């Protein structure tokens, strides 16, 4: 059995958003650019959507969940994190680098579209 490699986003100033539809992901990218939101994005491993990792002011987990919901985060992912939050679990805001042997695309800066490392600086 292969283990899945994943990125855990524990930094309280970073919020991960998983959009399962390419068209919706491209629209969200336009919105983030228009609002000058800093962060990174990439094509998901399924190639059907996008992952976003955006910078915010320090927020608690409840506020992060609200922001993710408002931006259209994958409902299943969001609901799983709501349940983890209610039970006080630390595993929160997970974006997978690889699923079923398929790797996600390279991270790119939201504003410049230049390739970036996996850290949201």
Image (cartoon, rainbow, N blue to C red):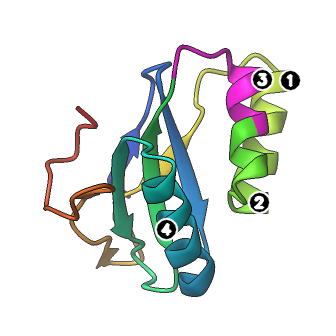
Q: CA distance from mark 2 to mark 1?
A: 15 Å
Check if mark 4's residue and mark 2's residue have beta carbons within 8 Å.
no
Q: CA distance from mark 1 to mark 4?
A: 33 Å
Check if mark 1's residue and mark 4's residue have beta carbons within 8 Å.
no
Q: Quadrant of the N terminus?
A: bottom left
N-terminal of the pair, mark 4 or mark 2, is 4
Q: How many marks?
A: 4
The foreground one among 115 and 38 is: 38
Q: Position of residue 114 (x, y in %)?
A: 14, 62
N-terminal of the pair, mark 3 or mark 2, is 3
* Residue shown at the point (47%, 22%) measured from the top left: 13
Tag nearer the camera, 4 or 3? 4
Q: Which residue is mark 3?
A: 62
N-terminal of the pair, mark 3 or mark 1, is 3
Q: Position of residue 100 (x, y in %)?
A: 42, 77
Q: Is residue 116 above or below residue 11?
A: below
Tag nearer the camera, 3 or 2? 3
Checking the image for residue 86, the label placed there is: 1
N-terminal of the pair, mark 1 or mark 4, is 4
Q: CA distance from mark 3 to mark 1?
A: 10 Å
Q: Which residue is mark 4?
A: 30
Q: Which residue is mark 2?
A: 76
Q: Is residue 95 above or below residue 91?
A: below
Q: CA distance from mark 4 to mark 3?
A: 26 Å
Q: CA distance from mark 3 to mark 2?
A: 17 Å
Whether residue 98 appears in this view of the structure is no
Q: Main secondary structure of the magenta part?
A: helix
Secondary structure beneath disc 2?
helix
Check if mark 3's residue and mark 2's residue have beta carbons within 8 Å.
no
Secondary structure beneath disc 3?
helix
């Amino acid at each position: 059995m292969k283990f899945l490699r994943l990125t855990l986003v524990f930094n309280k100033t970073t919020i991960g958003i998983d959009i399962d539809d390419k068209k919706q992901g491209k629209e969200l990218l336009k919105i983030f650019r228009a609002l000058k939101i800093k962060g990174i994005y990439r094509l998901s491993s399924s190639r059907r959507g996008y992952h976003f990792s955006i910078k915010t002011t320090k927020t608690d987990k409840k506020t992060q969940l609200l922001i993710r919901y408002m931006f259209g985060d994958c409902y299943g992912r969001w609901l799983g994190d709501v349940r983890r939050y209610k039970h006080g679990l630390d595993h929160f805001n997970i974006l997978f680098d690889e699923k079923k042997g398929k790797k996600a695309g390279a991270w790119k800066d939201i504003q410049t579209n230049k390739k970036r490392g996996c850290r949201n600086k």
